[in-house]
Image: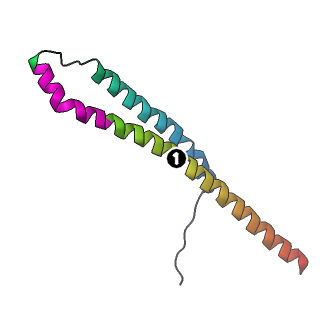
């Protein structure tokens, strides 16, 4: 099967993979700020505030949990991309060395 194939800029991929740590921290900060805002019960503790809390508190907690999971996933993604870039560069270097060595043996 033939086709156009693909190209990759493994060095750039490795550099960009580091940006996931910043995204990870940002997602964790958002989750923490949401938890802090909700824990202070900004809607009050009167009847209306209690009704608001019973209706929306669970959704706010769920959203904070989503951001927690997102931050962990972003960290894992950054590590995976960094590993992939390193493996690609190592394989490319190994292949180039094999070809060079084969040429010297001839």
In this figure, which colouring scheme has been used for the structure? Answer: rainbow
Residue at (42%, 35%) from the top-left corner?
27
In the image, residue 83 above or below residue 31: below
The percent coordinates of residue 3 (x first, y second) are: 52, 79
Along the horizontal axis of the image, is 87 left or right of 80? right
55 in magenta? yes
Residue at (33%, 27%) from the top-left corner?
34
The percent coordinates of residue 89 (x first, y second) are: 68, 58
Most extreme residue toward the right is 105
Along the horizontal axis of the image, is 62 left or right of 30? left
Quadrant in the rendering for residue 93? bottom right
Q: Is disc 1 placed on a helix, strand or loop?
A: helix
In the image, residue 42 above or below residue 18: above
Q: Which residue is mark 1?
A: 76
Q: Magenta region: which residues?
A: 48-63
Residue at (38%, 30%) from the top-left corner?
30
Along the horizontal axis of the image, is 6 left or right of 11? left
Instruction: Please tell me which residue lies in front, 41 or 97.
Output: 41
Q: Is the stretch drawn in magenta largely helix, strand or loop?
A: helix
Quadrant in the rendering for residue 63? top left
Most extreme residue toward the left is 47
Instruction: Please tell me which residue lies in front, 48 or 104.
Output: 48
């Amino acid at each position: 099967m033939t086709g156009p194939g693909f190209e990759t800029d493994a060095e750039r991929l490795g550099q960009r993979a580091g940006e996931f740590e910043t995204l990870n921290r940002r997602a964790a900060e958002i989750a923490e700020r949401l938890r802090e805002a909700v824990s202070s019960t900004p809607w009050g503790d009167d009847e209306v505030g209690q009704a608001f809390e019973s209706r929306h508190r669970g959704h706010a907690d769920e959203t904070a949990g989503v951001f927690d999971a997102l931050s962990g996933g972003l960290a894992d993604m950054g590590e995976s991309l960094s590993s992939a870039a390193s493996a690609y560069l190592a394989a490319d270097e190994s292949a180039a060395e094999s070809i060079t060595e084969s040429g010297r043996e001839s």
